[in-house]
């Protein structure tokens, strides 16, 4: 009976980690689409650099583009930390199988929260409105 619980809880923990990685990949793909749209529209804001009245539009555009790039860096760092921390969990020292599930679920939840917050972090760091 104890072995069945360990197998089921291990499966749940691995599934939660997989869900976190799928969400990370989804957010990254959405960011790539956002970057593609920004690059496709880039000639319009860059034309405003030559006008003293509308120069702020171009500066704001560049800040938003840099915030998108910084957000990608934050996502990579968050995923790297997740893999490092979860890979470093010593499963042999944990006697209760539910502890494994709660530990991995907690880290997966932190990864999901961090990935969705990276946009706000990048924008606040670069002071983009």
Image (cartoon, rainbow, N blue to C red):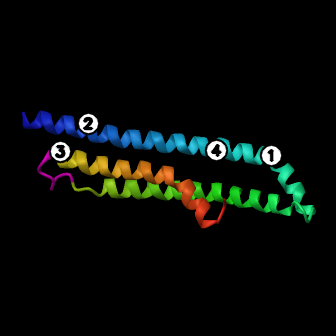
Left or right: 6 as drawn, with respect to 75: left
The answer to which of marks 4 and 3 sits earlier in the sequence is 4
Per the model, the C-alpha gap separating discs 4 and 3 is 37 Å
Local packing at callout 3 (Cα closer than 10 Å; few below 14, some 14-19, many 20+) is some
Residue denoted by label 1:
41
The answer to which of marks 3 and 2 sits earlier in the sequence is 2
Per the model, the C-alpha gap separating discs 3 and 2 is 11 Å
Single out the mark in the foreground, 3 or 2: 3
- Per the rendering, the mark at residue 98 is 3
The answer to which of marks 3 and 1 sits earlier in the sequence is 1
129 versus 14 height, above or below: below
The answer to which of marks 2 and 4 sits earlier in the sequence is 2
- Per the rendering, the mark at residue 11 is 2
Task: Look at the image and give the residue range highlighted in magenta.
Answer: 91-97
- Per the rendering, the mark at residue 32 is 4
Q: Secondary structure at mark 4?
A: helix
* Residue at the image position 35 percent from the left and 43 percent from the top: 17
Per the model, the C-alpha gap separating discs 1 and 4 is 14 Å
On the image, which quarter does residue 129 sit in? bottom right
């Amino acid at each position: 009976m104890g072995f069945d619980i360990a197998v089921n809880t291990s499966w749940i923990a691995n599934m939660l980690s997989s869900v976190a990685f799928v969400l990370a990949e989804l957010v990254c793909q959405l960011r790539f689409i956002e970057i593609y749209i920004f690059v496709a529209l880039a000639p319009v804001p860059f034309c405003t650099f030559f006008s003293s009245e509308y120069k702020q539009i171009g500066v704001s555009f560049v800040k938003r583009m840099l915030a998108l790039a910084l957000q990608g860096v934050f996502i990579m760092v968050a995923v790297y930390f997740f893999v490092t921390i979860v890979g470093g969990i010593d499963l042999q020292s944990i006697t209760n199988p539910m502890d494994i599930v709660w530990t991995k679920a907690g880290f997966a939840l932190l990864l999901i929260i961090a990935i969705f917050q990276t946009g706000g972090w990048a924008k606040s760091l670069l002071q983009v409105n």
